[in-house]
Image (tube, coloured by chain):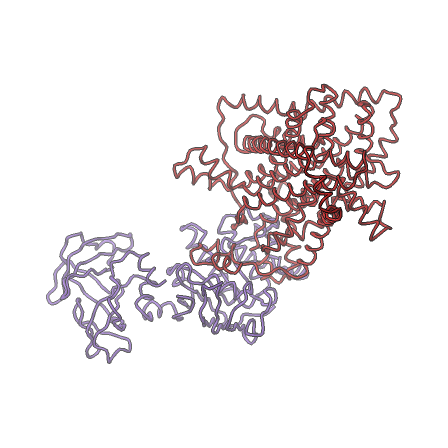
C-alpha cells in the first residue's frame, strides 16, 4: 500500500487529483472492529456450512459430490447464471442508455416502468406464466423469465451513473475524433464500470440463490436440489455438500468481479454543478425502440400483473377467501420489512465507510465477506442460524429478532453496494473542510457526508425492504410459530396449485414493494431542487 | 476562536513512500499578512497546505501558530483544533446546504443567531444570496462563499489552495481583488499557494518561492522580482534577460555595454547578470555609442509590447528581450539602438546562462 500511495501523490498529478488521491490514512480502530464484527456475522452461516461439510469425512464427501447428479446440477446452474447475467447486462445497459441519453418519446415514464419488474418477485412472475402455460417450464423459460425479473438490477445503478456523469467527458471524446459508438464503449461504459459490475454481481448471485422461481418452473438447480434434500429427504449432509459447491461458485464470481473492477475511484472533485448530459437523437429509430420498450414492459410487467389481477378476481370470489388472514399477513410482512431495512442499513454503513474512505486489502476482504451469504439460498442461512442459535443462544431460537437477523445477513450485500456507491460520490474533501471548521471526524461524517448520502441510505433501506417483503425460503423456516407473511401464505397456496387463493397475497406483495421502488426511481431521477421550489 | 497570528514552519519534511515531497521547509507568515507560496506544479505546495491543515502527518519539523505548537516530533493537533481555515480549489461548498448554512457551518448556534453569517455575507458582497444553493452561484460567487465560510469562525490563519485557478481569466482578476480586500478587512493572516507568478506578485504582501520541497526565497513581491536569489527564480517570477559579464569596479562589461551591478559578488570576475526587459528600451533613431541590434520578433499586447533583438557579441549573436510602449513597437528587421536603464543583478556564473529567448513555460520548467 505504501508504494501505491507514493505513486498517487506523485508530482505528475494535476493539483485537484492530488487532493482526491492522497492517502486518507489508516482506518480508525473502532470502525475496523465494528466492520469485522459485521463481516463475521455475515460469514457465520458459511462457517457452519463448511464445518458440517468437513465433519462428515472425505469418503462421504466423495460419495456425495462425485456423481452425475451433481454434475448435471452444476451444468444447469452455471449455464443458466451465465446466460441470464449476459442477457440482463445487455438489456439493463440498453434500457439505461435509451432512457437517460436519448430522445426516446416518454422516457420519464419508461424510466419508472422499466424499474418496476424488480418489485414483482421472480416466483410470482413464474407463477403467473406457469398458470397460463406449462410451456415455460425448462431451461429457456427459466432463463427468459429470470432475465425479465432481474435486469433492473443492472439498469438502475447504470442509469444513475449515466445521469451523474459529466457530459464534458463524452464531449471531449467526440472532439478527439471518436464516433458515438466508440465514445459509448470507450468513455461512457467505462464510467459506469463500478455500477455495471456491481449490478452484474447482484444479478448473478440472485440467480445462484433463486429458489421459488426455479421450483415453479420445474428447473433443477443447486437451490431446488438443496431444498428437496432438506425438506423432503431430511438429508442434511447432502444438502450442505451441495450448498458448499454453491458457495464456491459465489466465491468465483466475487474474485472475477474484484479483478474486473480495478482500482478506479470516482469521487468527483469539483463542487458538482455539472450540466445535464446531452441526449442522442434516435431519429426514426425512436419508434422501433419505443415498440421494443412496449414489448419489454408488456412481458416483464404487464403479463404477470394482468394474470395476477385475473386470479385475484377469481380467487377473492371463492369461498375459501379470508380477508382477515390477508390483512394479518400484510401487517407482519410490513413490520419485518421495516425492521430488516433499518438494521441492515445500519450494519452496511461501517463496511462502506471502511471500503471507500480507507481502502486496503483488509477493507476489501471485509466488504467481500458480506457478499458471500447473498449467494447462499435463504434456507441455508436459516438452517445454520437455527443450529447456531440452538447451540449458543437458545432463547433466540424461534423469535422475530432471529428472523430479522437472517434477513439482514441475506440482504447485507444490497445495502453495502448501495451505500458504497453513495459514499463514493461524496468527496472526502468536504469532510476535510468541515474539520478545518472545527468538526471532529464523527461530526464531519454526520454533518457533511451523511446528508449527502442520505438518499443513498434511503435507497439501501428500500432495497432491503423489497428483498425482505418478498423473501420466501428463510421465512418458511425461521418465522416464529403463528407468524404468517405474504410470501409464506402465497407459497402454501400456490404449491397446492390453488392459483386463485394465492393471488391476493402475491398482489399485496407487489403493491407493497411498488412504493419503495417508486421512491427509488424518484431519487435516481432526483436533481437537487433549487431553494425556491422547495 | 483566536485572532490573527503568525505562522512559523521550521524544517518541515514529508515523503510518500520513497518520493520526498517536502525537504526541510522553513516559512514565516507574519500576522495579518497575505503570503503567497509560489511554485511550479508538483513542487509540494499542496502537500504543504495539507500538512498545515493537519490532514497529513509530517515526517519531521514543526509548525507553530503564534505560541501554539500545531505539530512537532511529539504533537499532531487534529485539523479541527488548529483554528486554520481552508479554502480549497473550486470552493467545495457543501452542496446540501444553502449559502447561509455553508457560511455558518463552523459557528456555534449562538454565533449563527448573532448575525455573524450576515456580517460575512456582507463582507464578501453576497448579502442577497443567503438562501441560494451552491449550484445556483457562479464560480466566483462560490469562491467568495468558500472564503466567507473559512473566515466565519475567525481562524488564526486562512489557507487558500490555488483559489482562482478554476475561474476564467476575466473573472480571475476581479475575484482576486475582492478576495484581497475581504482578507484585508477581516485582518486575517492568509497563506495562498499558486503557480501563477502574476497572481502572487500582484496579490500578496510577501512571496515565498518554493522549489524542490523547500522555500528558497521569501520576501516582498518587489524584492523577489528585483533581487531573485538565483537565475532560475529570476526566470520563474517574470521575464529576464541573462547576460554573460565580466565584473570590475561595480560595473559589468556585457554585450550591452557597461552596466552598473548590484549583488555581493565583488570578488568575482566572471558572472551572469540579470536585467528585466522593462529596463531595456530600443530606439529606431540610432544613437552614437550605444549597442545596436536587429529586431527578430515583435509581440504586441496592447498596453505595451516586447521586441526580441539580436545583438552581435564576442561569442556570437545573442537574443535579448526589450519592453516598449505599444505605440512604439519597431518592425521586424529594423536596426535599433539599445539603452539600458538602472542596474543589473549579478549571479555567480555557474555553467551556461539560460538563454533568454526560451518560451515562458520552458523557462518556468528550469525552476522546477
Q: Which chain is the one coloured purple?
A: B
Q: Is residue B343 left or right of residue B198?
A: left
Q: Is residue A315 left or right of residue A300?
A: right
Q: Which residue corresponds to the image point at 80% horizontal and 26% vertical from the top-left? A: A494
Extreme residue in the left direction: B288
Q: Quadrant of the N terminus of chain B?
A: bottom right
Q: Position of residue A287 (x, y in %)?
A: 54, 21
Q: Decide: is B75 above or below B168.
A: below
Q: Which chain is the one coloured red?
A: A
Q: Decide: is A107 above or below A392.
A: above
Q: Position of residue B86 (x, y in %)?
A: 54, 61
Q: Quadrant of the C terminus of chain B?
A: bottom left
Q: Position of residue A273 (x, y in %)?
A: 53, 45
Comparing A144 with B151, the one in front is: A144
Comparing A495 with B270, the one in front is: A495
Extreme residue in the front direction: A59
Residue A413's quadrant in the figure?
Answer: top right
Q: Position of residue A263 (x, y in %)?
A: 53, 49
Q: Is residue A56 left or right of residue B238?
A: right
In the rendered picture of this protein, how many numbered marks are placed on residues? 0
Q: Is residue A354 left or right of residue A56?
A: left
Q: Decide: is B247 above or below A372.
A: below
Comparing A406 with A519, the one in front is: A406
Q: Which residue corresponds to the image point at 15% horizontal and 61% vertical from the top-left? A: B317
Amino acid at each position: 500500500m505504501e508504494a501505491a500511495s507514493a505513486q498517487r501523490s506523485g508530482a505528475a498529478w494535476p493539483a485537484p487529483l492530488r487532493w482526491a488521491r492522497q492517502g486518507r490514512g489508516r482506518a480508525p480502530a473502532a470502525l475496523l472492529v465494528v466492520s469485522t464484527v459485521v463481516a463475521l456475522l455475515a460469514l457465520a452461516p458459511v462457517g457452519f456450512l463448511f464445518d458440517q461439510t468437513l465433519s462428515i469425512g472425505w469418503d462421504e464427501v466423495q460419495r456425495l459430490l462425485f456423481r452425475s447428479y451433481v454434475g448435471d446440477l452444476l451444468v444447469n446452474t452455471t449455464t443458466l447464471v451465465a446466460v441470464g447475467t449476459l442477457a440482463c447486462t445487455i438489456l439493463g445497459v440498453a434500457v439505461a442508455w435509451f432512457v437517460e441519453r436519448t430522445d426516446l418519446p416518454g422516457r420519464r415514464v419508461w424510466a419508472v416502468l422499466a424499474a418496476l419488474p424488480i418489485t414483482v418477485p421472480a416466483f410470482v412472475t413464474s407463477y403467473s406464466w406457469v398458470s397460463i402455460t406449462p410451456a415455460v417450464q425448462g431451461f429457456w423459460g427459466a432463463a427468459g423469465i429470470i432475465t425479465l425479473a432481474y435486469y433492473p438490477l443492472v439498469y438502475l445503478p447504470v442509469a444513475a451513473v449515466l445521469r451523474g456523469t459529466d457530459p464534458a467527458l463524452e464531449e471531449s471524446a467526440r472532439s478527439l475524433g471518436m464516433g458515438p459508438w466508440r465514445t459509448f464503449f470507450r468513455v461512457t461504459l467505462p464510467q459506469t464500470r463500478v455500477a455495471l459490475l456491481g449490478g452484474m454481481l447482484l444479478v448473478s448471485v440472485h440467480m445462484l440463490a433463486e429458489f421459488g422461481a426455479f421450483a415453479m418452473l420445474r428447473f433443477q438447480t443447486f437451490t431446488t436440489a438443496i431444498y428437496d434434500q432438506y425438506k423432503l429427504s431430511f438429508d442434511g449432509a447432502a444438502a450442505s455438500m451441495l450448498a458448499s459447491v454453491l458457495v464456491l461458485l459465489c466465491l468465483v464470481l466475487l474474485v472475477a468481479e474484484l479483478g474486473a473492477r480495478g482500482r478506479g475511484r470516482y469521487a468527483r472533485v469539483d463542487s458538482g454543478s455539472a450540466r445535464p448530459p446531452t441526449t442522442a437523437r434516435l431519429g426514426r429509430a425512436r419508434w422501433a425502440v419505443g415498440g421494443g420498450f412496449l414489448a419489454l414492459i408488456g412481458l416483464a410487467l404487464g403479463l404477470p400483473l394482468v394474470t395476477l389481477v385475473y386470479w385475484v378476481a377469481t380467487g377473492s370470489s371463492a369461498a375459501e377467501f379470508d380477508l382477515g388472514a390477508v390483512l394479518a399477513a400484510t401487517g407482519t410482512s410490513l413490520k419485518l420489512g421495516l425492521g430488516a431495512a433499518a438494521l441492515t442499513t445500519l450494519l452496511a454503513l461501517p463496511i462502506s465507510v471502511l471500503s471507500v474512505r480507507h481502502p486496503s486489502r483488509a477493507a476489501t476482504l471485509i466488504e467481500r465477506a458480506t457478499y458471500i451469504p447473498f449467494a447462499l439460498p435463504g434456507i441455508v442461512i436459516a438452517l445454520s442460524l437455527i443450529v447456531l442459535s440452538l447451540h449458543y443462544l437458545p432463547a433466540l431460537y424461534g423469535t422475530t429478532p432471529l428472523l430479522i437477523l437472517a434477513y439482514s445477513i441475506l440482504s447485507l450485500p444490497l445495502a453495502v453496494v448501495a451505500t458504497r456507491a453513495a459514499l463514493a460520490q461524496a468527496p472526502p474533501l468536504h469532510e476535510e473542510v468541515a474539520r478545518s471548521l472545527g468538526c471532529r471526524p464523527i461530526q464531519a461524517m454526520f454533518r457533511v457526508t451523511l446528508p449527502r448520502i442520505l438518499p443513498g441510505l434511503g435507497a439501501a433501506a428500500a432495497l432491503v425492504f423489497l428483498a425482505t417483503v418478498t423473501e420466501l425460503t428463510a421465512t418458511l423456516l425461521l418465522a416464529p410459530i403463528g407468524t404468517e407473511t405474504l410470501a409464506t401464505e402465497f407459497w402454501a397456496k400456490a404449491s397446492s396449485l390453488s392459483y386463485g387463493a394465492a393471488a391476493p397475497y402475491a398482489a399485496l406483495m407487489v403493491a407493497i414493494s411498488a412504493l419503495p421502488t417508486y421512491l427509488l426511481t424518484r431519487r435516481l431521477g432526483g436533481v437537487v431542487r433549487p431553494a425556491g421550489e422547495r | 476562536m483566536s485572532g490573527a497570528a503568525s505562522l512559523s514552519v521550521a524544517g518541515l519534511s514529508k515523503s510518500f513512500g520513497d518520493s520526498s515531497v517536502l525537504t526541510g521547509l522553513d516559512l514565516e507568515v507574519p500576522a495579518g499578512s497575505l503570503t503567497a507560496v509560489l511554485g511550479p506544479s508538483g513542487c509540494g505546495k499542496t502537500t504543504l497546505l495539507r500538512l498545515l491543515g493537519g490532514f497529513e502527518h509530517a515526517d519531521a519539523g514543526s509548525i507553530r501558530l503564534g505560541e501554539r505548537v500545531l505539530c512537532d516530533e511529539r504533537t499532531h493537533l487534529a485539523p479541527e483544533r488548529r483554528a486554520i481555515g481552508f479554502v480549497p480549489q473550486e470552493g467545495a461548498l457543501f452542496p446540501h446546504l444553502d449559502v447561509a448554512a455553508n457560511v455558518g457551518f463552523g459557528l456555534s448556534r449562538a454565533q449563527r443567531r448573532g448575525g455573524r453569517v450576515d456580517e460575512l455575507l456582507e463582507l464578501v458582497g453576497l448579502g442577497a444570496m443567503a438562501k441560494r444553493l451552491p449550484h445556483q452561484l457562479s464560480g466566483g460567487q462560490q469562491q467568495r462563499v468558500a472564503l466567507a465560510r473559512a473566515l466565519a469562525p475567525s481562524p488564526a490563519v486562512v489557507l487558500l489552495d490555488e483559489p482562482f485557478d478554476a475561474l476564467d481569466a476575466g473573472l480571475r482578476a476581479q475575484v482576486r481583488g475582492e478576495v484581497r480586500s475581504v482578507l484585508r478587512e477581516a485582518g486575517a493572516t492568509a497563506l495562498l499557494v499558486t503557480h501563477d507568478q502574476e497572481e502572487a506578485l500582484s496579490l500578496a504582501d510577501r512571496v515565498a518561492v518554493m522549489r524542490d520541497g523547500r522555500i528558497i526565497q521569501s520576501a516582498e513581491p518587489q524584492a523577489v522580482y528585483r533581487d531573485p536569489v538565483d537565475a532560475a527564480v529570476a526566470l520563474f517570477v517574470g521575464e529576464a534577460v541573462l547576460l554573460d559579464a565580466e565584473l570590475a569596479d561595480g560595473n559589468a562589461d556585457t554585450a550591452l555595454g557597461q552596466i552598473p551591478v548590484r549583488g555581493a559578488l565583488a570578488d568575482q570576475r566572471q558572472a551572469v547578470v540579470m536585467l528585466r526587459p522593462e529596463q531595456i528600451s530600443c530606439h529606431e533613431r540610432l544613437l552614437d555609442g550605444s549597442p545596436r541590434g536587429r529586431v527578430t520578433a515583435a509581440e504586441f499586447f496592447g498596453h505595451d509590447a516586447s521586441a526580441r533583438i539580436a545583438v552581435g557579441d564576442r561569442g556570437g549573436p545573442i537574443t535579448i528581450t526589450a519592453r516598449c510602449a505599444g505605440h512604439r513597437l519597431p518592425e521586424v528587421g529594423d536596426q535599433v539602438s539599445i539603452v539600458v536603464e538602472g542596474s543589473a543583478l549579478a549571479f555567480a556564473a555557474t555553467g551556461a546562462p539560460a538563454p533568454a529567448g526560451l518560451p515562458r513555460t520552458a523557462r518556468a520548467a528550469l525552476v522546477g
